[in-house]
Amino acid sequence: MSDSSQTLDDFLRVLRASGLVDAGKIDQALAPWMDTEGRLPLGAEPVPEGLVAALIESGQLTPWQVDQLRKGRHKGFVLGKYKLLRLLGAGGMSSVYLAEHATLHHKVAIKVLPVKRVDQSSYLARFEREAQSSARLNHPNIARAFDLESSGAIHFIVLEYIDGTDLYAKVKREGPLDVREVAEYLRQAATGLQYAHDEGLVHRDIKPANLMLDKRGTVKILDMGLALANGDEAGSLTREHDEKVLGTADYLAPEQARDSHKADRRSDVYSLGCSLYFLLVGRAPFANGPLAERLRAHMNEPAPNLLEKRPDVPTAIAELYFRMMEKHPDARPQTAQEVADALAAWLGSTPTGPRPAGRLDPPRRAPRRGSGEGSATPGPRRQPGQVVRSGPGSTSGPLGSSGVLGSGSGSGSLPDSGRSGPESAAPSGVQGLPRIDTSSSPTRKGSATRAGGPPSAPQAKQAKQPAASKATATDPADEPSRPKIKTSWTDINVLGLPIVFWILFVAGIGAAVALAIAVLRTRA
C-alpha cells in the first residue's frame, strides 16, 4: 500500500498494530483533528501531514518508521530488546539498522542476516563466526561487537554504533582529501589493523567503506565478515563450500585475487595502499573496465603513479604508497605497524597544518607466540578454519555464490532495507586470470630493478628461493619499473627533523660560541 492511497483509518490501524507508540500518546497526537465530540473524520480522509510531523517532532516515530508505516508495514520494528529506528546500510549479505535498547535507551547498530540466507551455503556459520571474531577485539580503532541474538528465524549481531561517516562517503561528498588528513586516518587504521593481526586475524576486506570516521576524528575498522584466522584452513568453511576468492575487487591484493586462502597480513597492507590512493585521488587505483580486468590489473599492472594525479604529495608518502602496492608480498611493509610508524614519523616531521583530532593510541600489547602464514610477527594460534563473511555496506562475497549485493530486502518481516552499497564485489567465475608467480624476487626500495636496470649481487642473492618451492623466479628485468620520484637534499630528515633545521641549529651554535669568545677577549 503506497502512502498516496493510504487513508487516516488505514494509517492508524497500521500504527496501533506496530506497537511503536502507546495508545494514549496516539490519542494525544490526534486531539487537534478531533471534532467537538472527540471523534475523528475517518473513512476516506487522507493522512494529515501535520499528524505525521507531530509524531516525528515529539520523538514518537522516526522518518524511516513513518515511511514503512505509510507503506502498510507494521511488523519487524522490534528485535528482542531493541527497537529499530532507521536503516544504516544494506546488501545481499546483511542489513544494518540503528536501534535503541528498550530499557537502557542507548543506541546500537543491529546487523541482520536475511532469512533467505540462513539455509544457504555457509552464511549462518560465517555470521556466527563474525560475531565471535569481532567480540574478541577491543581496540579504539576497531568497531566493537557486543552480542549475537536471534528473534524467531531472524539472526542478528549487536554492534557498536558509530556516529559519523565512512571514508568512501566522505570522499564522494567532499572530493579528494588533504594529505595530512589522509595520513592521520590511515595511521589510525593501520594501528587497528596491527592489533587485529596480533590477535591472529587477517581482515581481507580493507577499503574506505569499511573505515568509519566518528565526529571526534577517530577512525574505526568495520566488518570482520571476511576475517581469516591464523592456522590450518584445510577444513574451513571457504574450502568446504568452494569459495576461492573473497573481498572487494578494487582493493584486492594480487595473492588474494588468486586465492583468498593465501591472504595474510601483508594483503591487508596492500588493500590499505589502495585505500590511500582512493582517499588522495577520489578513485581506486585500478577502477577501469569490468571486474575481471580489474583483478588482472592488480596482478600484472604497475601501481598508477600517485604524483601524476596529486603532485602535492610529499616524497615520503608517495614512496610509502609504492611500497604498499608492490605485487610481491615480501616487497611490501611486512606489518601494519610499519605503515603506522612511517605515517606517524611524517606527521611528526611536518609542522604545517593542525593534526586531525583523534584519541591517543593505547599501549599495544605484545603479539603472542604462534604461527601465521607469511607474517613477520607471529600471531596467536587459533582454531583451524575461522573465516567469516562480510558485513554492512560491503559488496564483497565469495565467488561462486551471489557475490554482488542483491535486492537488499530486509530479512523475513523486516521493513525494506534498500539496495546495495557503493563498491562492487569480485565477479563470479572469473575465467582466464593470470596466476601470480609469488616465487619471484621482490623489488626493494632504491634497487636497480625498480628503474629497470640489472639487479645487484646482493639482490640476486636475496632473490633465491628455497628448493622446496619448485617455482620459477620471474626475471626482475621483466617487472614493470616504478616511476622515479625526484628528491631534493632539503627533503632529508635527521632524527625526524629536516636537515635545514640542523644546518641552522649548528650555525646558531657557532655564532653563539664566536660571540662568547669575542666578549671574553674584550674583557681580558
Image (cartoon, rainbow, N blue to C red):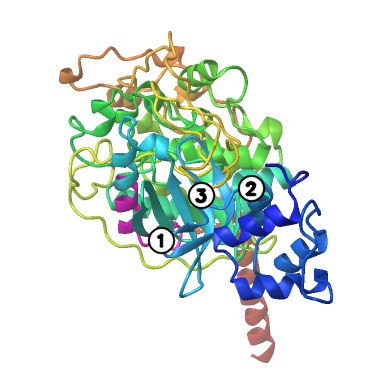
Taking depth in this image into account, of 263 and 483 the one nearest to the observer is: 263
Q: Secondary structure at mark 1?
A: loop
Q: Amino acid at mark 2?
A: Gly
In contact (CB < 8 Å): disc 3 and disc 1: no
Frontmost of labels 2 and 3 is 2
Furthest residue toward top:
432
The tag earlier along the polypeptide, 2 or 3, is 2
Q: What stretch of residues is rendered in magenta?
A: 129-146
Taking depth in this image into account, of 272 and 119 the one nearest to the observer is: 119
User: Marks 2 and 3, how far apart in space?
Assistant: 22 Å
Q: Amino acid at mark 3?
A: Val
Q: Is residue 159 above or below residue 335?
A: below
The tag earlier along the polypeptide, 2 or 1, is 2
Residue 155 numbered mark, or none? none
Label 1 belongs to which residue? 80
Q: Amino acid at mark 1?
A: Gly
The question of residue 385 being in magenta is answered with: no
Visible residue check, residue 208:
yes
Label 2 belongs to which residue? 72
User: Marks 2 and 1, how far apart in space?
Assistant: 22 Å
Visible residue check, residue 337:
no
Label 3 belongs to which residue? 96
Q: Secondary structure at mark 2?
A: loop
Report crowding for label 1: few under 14, some 14 to 19, many 20 or more residues within 10 A (C-alpha): few
Taking depth in this image into account, of 361 and 85 the one nearest to the observer is: 85
Q: Secondary structure at mark 3?
A: strand
Q: Is residue 121 left or right of residue 89?
A: left
Furthest residue toward front:
37
User: Marks 3 and 1, how far apart in space?
Assistant: 15 Å
